[in-house]
Image (spheres, rainbow, N blue to C red):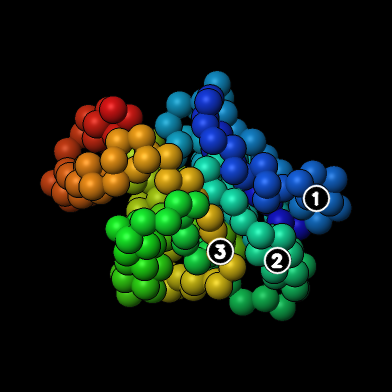
């Protein structure tokens, strides 16, 4: 079975719905929605979703990302292979808007951050063999996908699958591409300095 866990938020652009249209009643798929009513931080929602799941392969599906049917089918096939080797990774990141800086961000995310550094952000839609899960994520308000990647890459390097993960660029459109990009770099630097995650999350939300 493939378990698809979606940490939803109130009012989010729900691109994940496009991915799941034909899978709600699929015999080899379970879909688990975890809202902020159940757990506030995304890390808490991912922890809850994992422990509720039963599948051999788990997909942490970003709520503002859409995956093609071929990507889901690939993971179903993988989950049903009794001789599968452990694997984890993400899908080929793209934004739903065309802008030179957005294309660069996706390129960097795919080939530098994921393939070279072994860090898979949630908007790639992170999938993993459940045997890789050794301990829960700490209840941080932001950068829980980085924490997950650091745990997994100690065991196994991630793979980048070629199916497109189309992510909403709504924050970049709303705040401006350059302004949002600079904010993201400030947040990463704050995370590097171990600033309180609550402070970083409040900046991100603004």
Q: Which residue is mark 2?
A: 70
Q: Residue at the spot x=32%, y=30% of the render?
A: 205
Residue 124: x and y in percent read: 48, 57
The percent coordinates of residue 95 (x first, y second) are 46, 54
- Spatial separation of the CA atoms under disc 2 and disc 1: 12 Å
Q: Residue at x 35, y 43 (%)?
A: 172
Query: What residue is disc 3 on?
Result: 164
Q: Residue at x 48, y 46 (%)?
A: 168
Circle 3: element type: strand
Q: Position of residue 56 (x, y in %)?
A: 68, 60
The foreground one among 77 and 63 is: 63
Q: Are marks 2 and 1 in contact (CB under 8 Å)?
A: no
| Figure quadrant of the N terminus | bottom right
- Which numbered disc flags the more N-terminal residue, 2 or 3? 2
Q: Is residue 63 visible?
A: yes
**116 shown above or below 62:** below
Marks 2 and 1, the one that precedes in the sequence? 1
């Amino acid at each position: 079975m493939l378990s698809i866990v979606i940490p939803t938020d109130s009012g989010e652009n729900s691109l994940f719905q496009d991915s799941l249209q034909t899978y709600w009643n699929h015999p080899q798929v379970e879909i688990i929605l975890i809202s902020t009513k159940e757990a506030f931080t995304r890390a808490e929602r991912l922890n809850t979703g994992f422990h509720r799941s039963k599948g051999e392969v788990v997909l942490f599906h970003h709520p503002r990302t859409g995956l093609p049917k071929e990507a889901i089918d690939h993971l179903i096939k993988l989950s049903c292979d009794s001789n599968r080797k452990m694997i984890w990774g993400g899908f080929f990141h793209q934004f739903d808007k065309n802008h030179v800086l957005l294309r660069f961000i996706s390129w960097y995310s795919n080939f530098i951050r994921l393939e070279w550094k072994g860090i898979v952000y949630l908007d790639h839609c992170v999938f993993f063999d459940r045997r890789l899960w050794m301990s829960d994520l700490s209840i941080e308000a932001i950068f829980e996908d980085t924490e997950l990647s650091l745990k997994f890459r100690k065991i196994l390097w991630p793979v980048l699958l070629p199916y497109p993960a189309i992510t909403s660029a709504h924050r970049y459109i709303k705040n401006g591409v350059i302004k949002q990009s600079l904010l993201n770099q400030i947040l990463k630097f704050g995370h590097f300095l171990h600033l309180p995650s609550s402070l970083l999350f409040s900046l991100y939300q603004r």
